[in-house]
Amino acid sequence: MSPKEVKIVPSEEEVIKTLCELIQDIARTAIQRDDVFKVGLSGGSLTKFLTVGLPKIETDWAKWRLFFCDERVVPVESADSTYGVYKSSLIGIVPLTEEQFIKIDPHLTAEEAAKDYIQKMAVHFPPDSLPRFHLLLLGMGPDGHTCSLFPDHRLLEETSVWVAPITNSPKPPASRITLTFPVVNNAECCIFALTGAGKADIVKRVLKDEEPLPAARVKPTDGKLYWILDNSAAAHITDM
């Protein structure tokens, strides 16, 4: 099982700083070794953290390849498009190009988009093996979901494909694609970064009570797992 490190810092500002310094270090190591940095992005509050923090790091941006841990099958112009948010908030702020983002085709059905995304991913990883990302940046919802892997959903047990479609997401929009757990847990590093009192209960349920919620199933088999929390999000686990 992966080594897990929980970092508790005073404020959201410190979460962003800690997160982006860690990203900087992981990217540097990956680029030195592999001449590329392959990172999976999530939406939600993580988009704000990265928009604020990434412009302050030092890295060889040209070596970055940015994938999506999950994505909503909606037009890029939609506020629900995770790529759309990063496109508007990062491109032009840091020297990334649209071509460095490996994105879904939003004009396809979820089933077709998932198959298409597998083909797009395959170009960037060795053949005949599970993709091994340098880093996956993950979020967690109030129900303990991560990526678009929701509690009690059949996709939690999906092992036959890298990327799965979901058309009945309990959180709208209903139509999405998501990395599956075999790929998530094959990553070299996974990071959760969470802030606010609204996350305190679910953080306790996952980290202290060890409920078998989707986020608790993120356990890289040969990698590292970080949880970066502010004091409010960590309020119920300080005696761990």
Image (tube, helix red, strand yellow):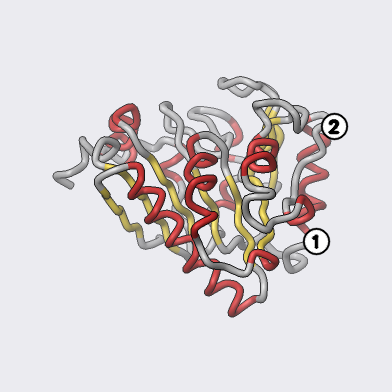
The residue lying at 55 percent from left, 37 percent from top is 156
Badge 1 amino acid: Val
Residue lying farthest to the front in this orientation: 93
Please provide percent x and percent y for residue 187: 55, 59
Question: Seen in the image, is 88 located left or right of residue 234?
Answer: right
> Would residue 43 be seen by someone viewing this image from the given angle?
yes
Q: Is residue 3 left or right of residue 123?
A: left
Q: Please say if 174 is above or below 220.
A: above
For this orientation, the residue located farthest to the bottom is 33
Q: Which residue, given by chain and number where applicable, does mark 1 sit on?
A: 123
Distance from Cα at disc 2 to Cα at disc 1 = 20 Å
Pointer 2 residue: 108
Q: Amino acid at mark 2?
A: Leu
Res 100 → quadrant: bottom right
Q: Position of residue 134 (x, y in %)?
A: 57, 63
Q: Secondary structure at mark 1?
A: loop
Judged from the image, the secondary structure of the residue bearing numbered disc 2 is: loop
The reply, left or right, for residue 125 in relation to residue 22 is: right
